[in-house]
Amino acid sequence: MLSQSLLALPLYLSSIFGLGWFDKLLITSEAYQSTITEQNLLEHAENLVQFSQIGGANTRVAGSVGHNATVDYIKSQLDATEFYDTYIQPFTYTYSRGNATLSVGSTIYKAGYFSYGPAGKANAPLVIVNNSGCAKNDFPADVAGRIALIIRGNCTFSDKVALSGAAGAAGAIIYNNQDGSLGSGTLSDVSNPLGPYVPAGGISGHDGQILVAAVQSGKEVIGNLIVNAIVQVRNTANVVATTKIGDHDNVITIGGHTDSVPEGPGINDNGSGSMAVLELARQLPNFKVNNAVRFGFWAGEEFGLLGAKHYAEHLSKEETSKIALYLNFDMLASPNFGYFVYDGDGKAFGVAGPAGSDHIEETFKDFFKSTNLQSAATKFDGRSDYAPFFDAGIATGGILTGAEELKDEAGVARWGGEVGVAYDKCYHQACDTMNNLDVTAWVHNTKGAAHAIAVYSNSLDGIPRPAEGRKPASQNLISPYAPQTA
């Protein structure tokens, strides 16, 4: 059953002062941060676990009963505050689930399935694809009838698999461009104009390098790739809530995705982000804000940022212009965590966000400095729900604790933890449960989010307004076929 303390919705300032919305004190970072508690975050997470177990499914994938219960829970929590104009935004999407296995001789390699990919089998020699497999001429002629072996990076999984099909390959194996697991990924749609999809799987960089070396030795390396998959249309929904108070011509928007992958309950990815956003929304009614605040709970992120894209694509030009900035929260409690801030100014990775993103980056960095925590930049790589806002020219930022990437020695020096181990070793797996959370990191990050919301709901200094003065990002993040998502 649901936690009684959450259903009761205690809002600590209003319980003390009994103030109306317009009589409350203007939000401050310190006061807002003080409303964030470990207990409330954990109670939300426990409820998500219960939802994931409905019918024994162990998932909250978009359109499932577990995800529908998540959406209903979020909506009921928001409605109970009476502080927001809240609505459900339904949409349909093509659901896909499958598994992939790869063996070479007696060796079985752990492989991930790419959603929307076809079922099928390929028993054929492996052929190394040149460069990153992002252009037709990367594929040698002898790949026809064989299995293409492709390194991750520089274009989407979809393009790599479609180009493999165009080259006549019987299948495709994409290996990570670092030692860690590739995890599961998405092709983002059932088709790609570059070519027909072929059965495909993803493997770790370590395993990929073993296979590359074997092929380069001159031996014929026979791979046996088997992909099982189902594809079906499903219904799902976003939840959107906007404060009734504040300047609605200058809206700050906060978001996180509510769905998990089919393989697990998604308590870190992204229960940690979505429940942080929900708790922030529950506590905001304690305060007065100058600028309206909108909370977006996006569905279908794991299938290609579908909910966030649906929301952004259905905004009018006028509605888009009223969004001053977007803050994204995805994976805030990884057990081998780092404190990462999106590289808004582009100085670390060369991909700057739209004008104002640099200010958001500094706001988060200032928070971590103020709490004596080190942070590091992370790239805008298009793997989470910020991408459609980024592409719309809206100032964008956010924080996260890491996914399948391996923590290096520099990361251990900053944050402790285990070197050579993924930030989240249960990323996109059944073990992404309550035991997969670092609660201390979760609380720190939720307070960091509270700090940014307090700053920008007070003042948009540093964020270009009006929208006509916005400078777009240096590049778009979303092609019609989005890259792997978190």
Image (cartoon, helix red, strand yellow):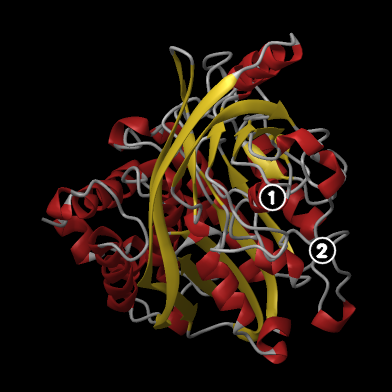
User: Of 261 and 247, which appears nearest the observer?
Assistant: 261
Rendering quarter of residue 377: top right
* Residue 479, above or below 451: below
Residue 408 relative to residue 109: left or right: right
Residue 167, percent from left and from top: 73, 47
Residue 189, percent from left and from top: 56, 63
Residue 130, percent from left and from top: 82, 33
Rendering quarter of residue 150: top right
At label 1, which amino acid type do we have?
A: Thr
Which of the marked residues, 1 or 2, is nearer the chain's N terminus? Answer: 1
Placement of the N terminus among the 4 image quadrants: bottom left
Give the labeled residue for mark 2.
354
At label 2, which amino acid type do we have?
A: Pro
Q: Nearer the viewer, mark 1 or mark 2?
A: 1
Residue 33, percent from left and from top: 49, 51
User: Of 134 and 474, which appears nearest the observer?
Assistant: 134
Point out which mark residue 156 bears.
1
Q: Secondary structure at mark 1?
A: loop
Please tell me how crowded label 1 is: few (under 14), some (14-19), or many (20+) other residues with Cα within 10 Å.
many
* Residue 401, above or below 35: above
Residue 214 relative to residue 357: left or right: left
Point out which mark residue 215 bears.
none
Q: Is residue 290 visible?
A: no
Residue 74 relative to residue 25: left or right: left
Could you tell me how far apart the alpha carbons at marks 1 and 2 are, in whole angstroms? Answer: 22 Å
Q: Secondary structure at mark 2?
A: loop
Q: Is residue 121 visible?
A: yes
